[in-house]
Amino acid sequence: MAKVKKETSFLVSTANSGFFYPNRKNRKKIRTGKKLQLKKYDPRLRKHVLFTEQKLSRLKEPFSREKALAKLQAETP
């Protein structure tokens, strides 16, 4: 049986909405320690936000759309 040559990682929203995209990477092509960062659509906020590659961990508090939007507005100049 063949070995799995791809590794699953997750793109987690930086707006702390708890939304993530699964991402599969080829193990042979992973050379640098750089984390993938993409601007993608977050359906919980209904906006495009930055997603970074992270390990999945449970949310410490339940998602609140109002808090997440307030945090986003505070970060943008």
Image: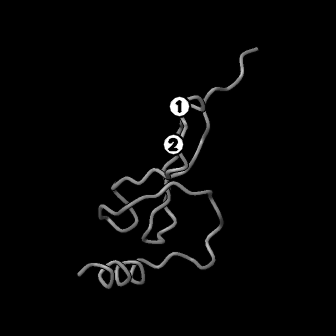
Label of residue 29 in the image: 1
Colour logic:
one colour
Tell which residue pokes out farthest to the front in this image. 32
Q: Position of residue 24 (x, y in %)?
A: 54, 37
Label 2 to label 1: alpha-carbon separation: 14 Å
| Residue 18 tag number | none
The residue drawn where x is 50% and y is 59% is 12
Q: Which residue lies at the image location 42% right of the left edge and 58% below the top edge?
A: 51
What is the total number of numbered labels drawn onto the structure image? 2
- 1 or 28, nearer to the observer: 28
Q: Quadrant of residue 73?
A: bottom left
Residue displayed at 51% across by 42% down = 23
> What's the amino acid at mark 2?
Asn
Left or right, 63 with reference to 49? right
**Who comes first in sequence, dot 2 or dot 1?**
2
Res. 59 image quadrant: bottom right
Q: Eyeballing the image, is 53 above or below 76?
A: above
Q: Name the amino acid type tagged 1.
A: Lys
Which residue in the protein does label 2 denote?
A: 23
Closest to the observer: 75 or 28? 28
Residue extending furthest toward the top: 1
Q: Residue furthest left?
A: 77
Q: Position of residue 36 (x, y in %)?
A: 45, 50
Q: Position of residue 52 (x, y in %)?
A: 46, 58
Q: Nearer the viewer, mark 2 or mark 1?
A: 1
Left or right for 20, reference 76: right
**Label 2's element?**
strand
Neighbour tally class for label 1: few under 14, some 14-19, many 20 plus, Cα within 10 Å: few
Q: Position of residue 40 (x, y in %)?
A: 34, 54
